[in-house]
């Protein structure tokens, strides 16, 4: 390190000058937007003027993060001694680096509006988080922060280890014979995911991983009260389009937390050890998915990280990413590896629906059974995965199939591409059309 420079070899004066330019640019954009009507009431010319100003400021933010990501992250995490989750990190950045990411009041203003009427301040969060995740220094530390158990799970752990039962608003978690049974119980919306369900799922996954009595986990959908599927079990209808239309699906609280939180923990476990320990730093367990009726969108995405998938013979799987207009999580990283590049393109780009009974489904599903036998088949699979050599072998399989660095690189670009799609006109139009349904 050169004398007079920070940990990344950057002179403090250079960083300070860049921050001042960034703050000035952000203030100019804020003044312009404040002088314009609300986004939905702007003329074509006013929208073009706002877009040009926002683009210029975002170019500046991108260059800033390309150069100073490590210095920014070190300051926010006290030299990487504090583990901040993505929401905490973005909030801290807003206070420490004015103009880099939107402040809480700006985000609150946008959050109160339906998706079509928002300004799109979350795009600046996407630029910031892409810069952090791109860094080979800051990015791995942030991934580790997201693998740590949530405070909510730690509070509930004594109750779960004692009683073997936790019920949240959207998930029922029950331990039976060393198996954690996670049942998604959003019966009104076909287990369509929103921020509430993501929070409940991460809590349940943490508890299952942290409880030493649990040796395997099973995820299944519960019985529905939705008129069309009343009394039937449904795995998941994917993203909650009604919540998306209302503006309640956020980049940080849903889209990124879901991928870097509970889904990453299903793959890599919950982080409990300290860096430098010779023992494994994570607690991992094998997982079984049991699919009744259908797994659409985010539901199908989940299947790609499970160790064993059981499906009813009348079930189907689909990833209608092109139809919805968004990026299907980390499926573009995983589906081609699991099913091959041609089938992956047919499913993601063409919207192909895979019936559980057709031959190609065997690339995504391990067992196809009669609908009445799904539960029993899932329990048998979980029992078979309790062996002591299963965890180290799944760890090595996951390491070979999806190296952490490949996942980090993918999620860095996902952070920006997904938020851009969230505010794209076609997505807003489609969300409005589907907004009244599950």
Image (spheres, grey):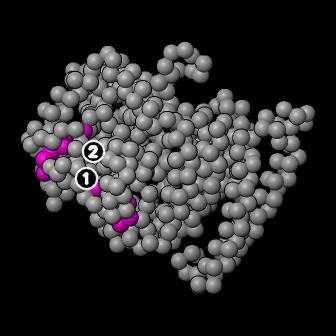
What span is in magenta?
Answer: 309-323
Helix, strand or loop at label 1? It is strand
**Image side of residue 322 versus residue 275, left or right:** left
In the rendered view, tell whether residue 237 sits above or below residue 208: below
Residue at x-position 15% and y-position 42%: 368
Q: In which quarter of the image is the N terminus?
A: top right
Helix, strand or loop at label 2? It is loop
Residue at x-position 55% and y-position 52%: 413
Residue 142 in view, yes or no: yes
> Which numbered disc, 1 or 2, marks the residue that appears first in the sequence?
1
In the rendered view, tell whether residue 274 sits above or below residue 409: above
Residue 251 spot, x, y in % from top left: 51, 54
Residue 54 spot, x, y in % from top left: 67, 68
362 or 262, which is in the foreground? Answer: 362
Q: How far apart are marks 1 and 2 (CA)?
A: 9 Å
Residue at x-position 88% and y-position 46%: 13
Please, which residue is most extreme toward the right here?
A: 3
Residue 2 among those drawn in magenta: no
Q: Quadrant of the C terminus?
A: bottom left
Residue 319 among those drawn in magenta: yes
Within-10-Å neighbours for mark 1: few <14, some 14–19, many 20+ = many
Residue 258 spot, x, y in % from top left: 44, 45
Q: Tell me which corner region of the image, top left, top right, bottom left or bottom right, holds residue 226.
A: bottom left
In the rendered image, which residue does mark 1 sit on? 317
Whether tag 1 and tag 2 are in contact, CB under 8 A, the answer is yes
Within-10-Å neighbours for mark 2: few <14, some 14–19, many 20+ = many
**Image side of residue 96 versus residue 185, left or right:** right
In the rendered image, which residue does mark 2 sit on? 364
Residue at x-position 43% and y-position 29%: 269
**Image side of residue 53 versus residue 163, left or right:** right
């Amino acid at each position: 390190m050169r004398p007079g420079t920070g940990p990344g070899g950057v002179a403090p004066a250079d960083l300070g000058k860049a921050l001042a330019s960034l703050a000035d640019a952000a203030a100019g954009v804020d003044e312009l937007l404040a002088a314009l009507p609300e986004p939905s009431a702007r003329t074509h010319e006013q929208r073009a003027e706002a877009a040009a100003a926002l683009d210029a400021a975002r170019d500046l933010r991108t260059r800033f993060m390309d150069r100073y990501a490590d210095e920014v992250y070190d300051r926010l995490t006290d030299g990487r001694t504090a583990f901040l989750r993505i929401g905490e990190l973005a909030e801290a950045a807003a206070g420490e680096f004015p103009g880099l990411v939107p402040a809480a009041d700006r985000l609150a203003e946008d959050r109160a509006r339906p998706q079509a009427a928002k300004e799109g301040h979350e795009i600046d969060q996407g630029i910031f988080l892409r810069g952090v995740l791109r860094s080979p220094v800051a990015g791995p530390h942030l991934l580790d922060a997201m693998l740590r158990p949530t405070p909510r799970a730690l509070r509930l752990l004594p109750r779960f280890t004692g009683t073997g039962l936790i019920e949240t608003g959207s998930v029922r978690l029950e331990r039976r014979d060393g198996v954690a049974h996670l049942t998604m119980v959003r019966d009104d919306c076909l287990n369509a995911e929103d921020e509430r369900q993501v929070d409940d799922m991460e809590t349940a996954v943490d508890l299952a991983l942290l409880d030493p009595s649990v040796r395997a986990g099973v995820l299944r959908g519960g019985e529905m009260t939705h008129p069309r599927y009343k009394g039937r079990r449904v795995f998941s209808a994917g993203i909650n389009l009604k919540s998306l239309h209302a503006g309640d699906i956020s980049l940080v609280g849903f889209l990124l937390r879901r991928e870097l939180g509970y889904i990453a923990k299903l793959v890599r476990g919950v982080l409990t050890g300290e860096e430098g320990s010779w023992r494994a730093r994570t607690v991992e367990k094998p997982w079984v998915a049991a699919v009744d009726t259908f797994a659409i969108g985010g539901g199908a995405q989940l299947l790609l990280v499970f160790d064993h998938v059981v499906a009813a013979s009348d079930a189907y799987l689909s990833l209608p990413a092109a139809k919805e207009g968004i990026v299907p999580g980390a499926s573009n990283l995983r589906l081609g590896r699991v099913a091959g590049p041609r089938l992956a393109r047919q499913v993601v780009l063409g919207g192909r629906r895979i019936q559980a009974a057709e031959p190609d489904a065997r690339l995504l599903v391990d067992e196809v059974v009669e609908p009445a036998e799904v539960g029993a088949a899932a329990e048998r699979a979980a029992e078979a995965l309790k062996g002591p050599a299963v965890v180290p072998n799944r760890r090595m399989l996951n390491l070979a199939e999806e190296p952490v660095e490949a996942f980090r690189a993918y999620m860095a670009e996902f952070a920006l591409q997904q938020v851009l799609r969230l505010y794209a006109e076609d997505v807003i139009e489609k969300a409005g059309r589907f907004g009244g349904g599950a």
